[in-house]
Amino acid sequence: MHHYAAVPLDKSYLLLNHGPVTLVSSAAAGRQNVMAAAWAMPLDFSPPKVAVVIDAQTLTRELIEASGEFVLSIPVRAQAERVLAAGSQSGRDGDKFVLTGLSPLAASQVGAPLIAGCAACLECKVLPEAHNQQRYDLFIGEVVAAWADPAVFSQGRWHFDTDAARTLHYVAGGAFFATGEPVAVS
């Protein structure tokens, strides 16, 4: 007999949902916004692609649909309160950068901003898939530029020298984990 315990299907997402939380930023028609999204994942290597779920009711969705662009930024533990605020408030209620204290930076290939202080940022252009977007709120983006803080990512490897610089992993109900210790396997 195995040692697993059954997990209710409506909680099964939690088993995969410890990848790093992302901040999704967007801009169109003179407006910009940022939201937190735990459901983002890499899809392909060449060209690099990502998938992210963006709820139809959000201002971020409106701006992404208008511009065809977004940025995924990967925040760190020191930004946890701001990330939670970005996930708890609507950009329709005011400037989310003012509301959260997050700082936008100009991107190189897209109009959506990078987020200062993050471990990494991916500039993305939407690969339109109308059915997936409308039915599943699923957006696929091609990564057109990628940036990382060399203090935590260099030569293709993560290295977290301080707890404050560890990436965040959102599970549910306002709870986060921080990236743990590396495990060396030879």
Image (tube, helix red, strand yellow):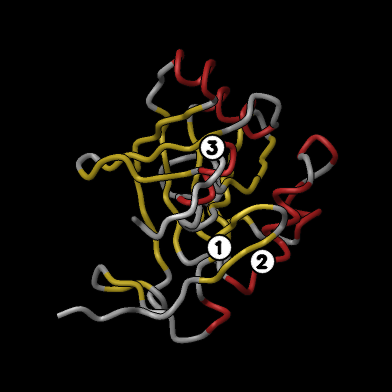
First in sequence, mark 2 or 3: give its number.
Answer: 3
Q: Is 62 located above or below residue 23 in the figure?
A: above
Relative horizontal placement of residue 157, taking residue 18 as reference (left or right)? left
**Relative depth, front residue between 135 and 7:** 7
**Relative depth, front residue between 47 and 174:** 174
Residue 146 falls in image quadrant = bottom left
Amino acid tagged 2: Ala
Residue sitting at 50 percent across and 47 percent down? 6
Residue sitting at 42 percent across and 50 percent down? 122
Position of the N terminus by quadrant = bottom left
Evaluate if marks 1 and 3 touch, with contact meaning CB atoms under 8 Å apart: no
Kindly report which numbered mark, 1 or 3, lies closer to the viewer in this rendering. Answer: 3
Relative horizontal placement of residue 95, taking residue 139 as reference (left or right)? right
**Residue sitting at the far front:** 1
Q: Which residue is mark 3?
A: 9
Amino acid tagged 3: Leu
Q: Residue 30: x and y, percent?
A: 68, 34
Q: Which mark is residue 50?
A: none
Residue sitting at 34 percent across and 36 percent down? 142
Q: Which residue is mark 2?
A: 80
Q: Which mark is residue 75?
A: 1
The local crowd at label 2, few if under 14, some if 14 to 19, many if 20 or more residues have their Cα within 10 Å, is: many
The local crowd at label 1, few if under 14, some if 14 to 19, many if 20 or more residues have their Cα within 10 Å, is: many
